[in-house]
Amino acid sequence: MASSVRVRFAPSPTGYLHVGGLRTALYNFLFARKNNGKFILRIEDTDRARYVDGAVEKLIDALHWAGIDYDEGPNKNGDVGPYIQSERLEIYRKHVEQLLQNGKAYHCFCASERLEQMRKEMEAKKVDVKYDRTCLKLSEQEIQNNIEKKIPFVVRMKIPEHRTIAFHDIVRGDVEFQSDLIDDQVLLKSDGFPTYHLAVVVDDHLMEISHVIRGEEWLSSVPKHLLLYEFFGWEVPQMAHLPLLLNPDKSKLSKRQGDVAVEDYRDKGYLKEALVNFVALLGWNPGTEQDIFSMEELIEQFSLERVHKSGAVFNLEKLNSLNATHLRKKSDEELLKILKDELAKSKFAGKHFADEYLLQVVTAMRERVTFVKDFIEQSSYFFEAPTAYDETAKAKNWKPETSYQLKLLTAEFSKLENPKKEDYEIALHKTAQQLQIGNGKLIHGVRLAISGVSGGPGLYDILSILGKEESMKRIYTAIETIK
C-alpha cells in the first residue's frame, strides 16, 4: 500500500482513555506504520456537556505511555489543522450553509418539549421514532422570521426516501441500510456546535483520511455519513468497524464490571508491552500460534483482513499471563531500573539497596512474579527482617526441638568464610547428619526464621543473598521470638 495511507484516532475528552479506545488507537497506529502512512490524533470535543478539563492531556499521556505516537495532532501540527474540533467551528458552519443552499439540510425550530411529546406518541403507536419533518414544510419567509425572532434552531440533514445505502466494510464485508429507517440527523446544534456526524465527515475529508478504523458501535451511523459524502460530492474513505469488547459473561465491557481505563491498568502495575500485546489480540490474530508480540512484531504482522467480526472477550487471566511473560523477557538491567522505581514508591523509599544486591533479588524472583510490585510484596524479607511469622508454617514446622537444631546450624554457619550458596547447603547437610534428621526438618525451620513465610525461592539462594551475618541474626531473633 502506498504512502497515501492516512488514518486517525478521534477520541472525545470525557475523562480517561478506555481500553477500547486504546485498541482503536493501536490498530490505526499499526496500520499506518505497516503501510508507511500517517497516524493522526484528532480531539472531538463538540459535545460540551461531556467535556472534562484536563482530559486531552490525560489521553495524550496514556497514548505516549503505551508507545503510540501520532504524526499530526495537538502540538504536532501538520497542514490540515487545527486538530481540535472546537477550533474548527467556522469550517463546519460553511459546510452546513452549503447543505442548506443545496436543499440537503433544513432548519428545525421544534422545542425539546414538542420533540419529547412526538417521541412518546410514536412509541405508543409502536412505530419507528423519527423526526416528523414539521419544519421541512416551513416557507423561506417563516424560516427568516424565526431566525430574526432569535428562536433557537438546529439544522437537520434531509434523508432521501426509499434508498438502499450500501458499502463494503473491510472487517464486516458488504453492509446495506434502508434510508426510510434513518432519522433526519441533527448536523448543527442550537449552540452552534456540530454533531459528531457532520464534524467527522468534514474532518475526515479535509484531513485526507484514507481509512476509517473505529469501533462497531459506529456502524449504524455509516449511512448518514455516506449520504453526507454524497451531498458534498466527496470520495468515501475505506472503512473497518472493529468488534465489541466483551466481559467474560459476553456483556459489553463496562466500568460497572471492572476497570476499563488505561490509567487503571498502568497504576496497577501492568507493563505497557503486556497491555498493548493483550489489546492487539482483542479482535485480531496473526493466523499462527504466536501470542507474545513486541510492538515491532505487531507492526510487521498486523492486517485489517485478520480482524474478526465477533466480539472479543476481555480475559484478565490472559492479561496477567502476558504481563508475567513480558516481565520475564526484560533484561536484568531493565528489571533493576523498574524495581528501583517501585521501591521508591513503597514503604522502603529512602532505604538504600546496592544495585548488586537488587540484581540478586531479581535473579531469584524473576520466574515467580507477575508484576514488578510482586518483587516487594512477595519477598519483603529481602528488604526488611520479618517481624511476624506465618502461623500455619509455624504450627507445622517449628517444633520444641527446632530452636536447639537451629542453634547447632548457626554454629556451623559461623565457621564459614565468605560463603557461597553451596557452602550453606553443605553446612546444613552436615548439621542434619549430626542430628540424625532429614534435611527438610532444618530447611523449613531456617526458611521460616529468615523470611517469616514458607514459600519463595530456594533457601540457599535466600541465604546467599541476605549474607551470613544477616541470616544468623534473623535465626537468633526467631529462636528468641517463636515459642
Image (cartoon, rainbow, N blue to C red):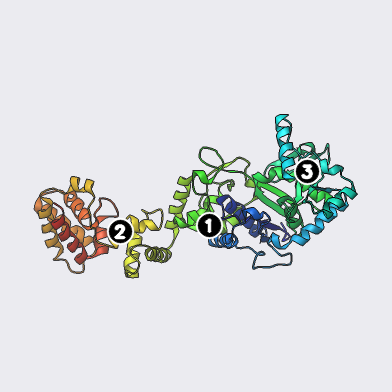
Name the amino acid type tagged 1: Ser
Q: Is residue 389 left or right of residue 355?
A: left
Residue closest to the eye, 38 or 139: 139
Closest to the camera, between mark 1 and mark 3, is: 3
In the displayed image of the protein, which residue is found farthest to the front?
149
Q: Secondary structure at mark 2?
A: helix
Look at mark 3 in the image and give the residue it sits on: 184
At a point 55% along the width and 39% down the height, the residue shown is 251
The x and y percentages for residue 246 are 55, 42
Question: Which mark is first along the chain, 3 or 2?
Answer: 3
Look at mark 1 in the image and give the residue it sits on: 294
The x and y percentages for residue 326 are 46, 56
At a point 31% along the width and 67% down the height, the residue shown is 357
Name the amino acid type tagged 3: Asp
Q: Image quadrant of residue 380? A: bottom left
Circle 1/circle 2 CB separation < 8 Å: no
Circle 1/circle 3 CB separation < 8 Å: no
Q: How many residues crowd around disc 2 within 10 Å: few (fewer than 14), some, or many (20 or more)?
A: some
Q: Image quadrant of residue 309? A: top right
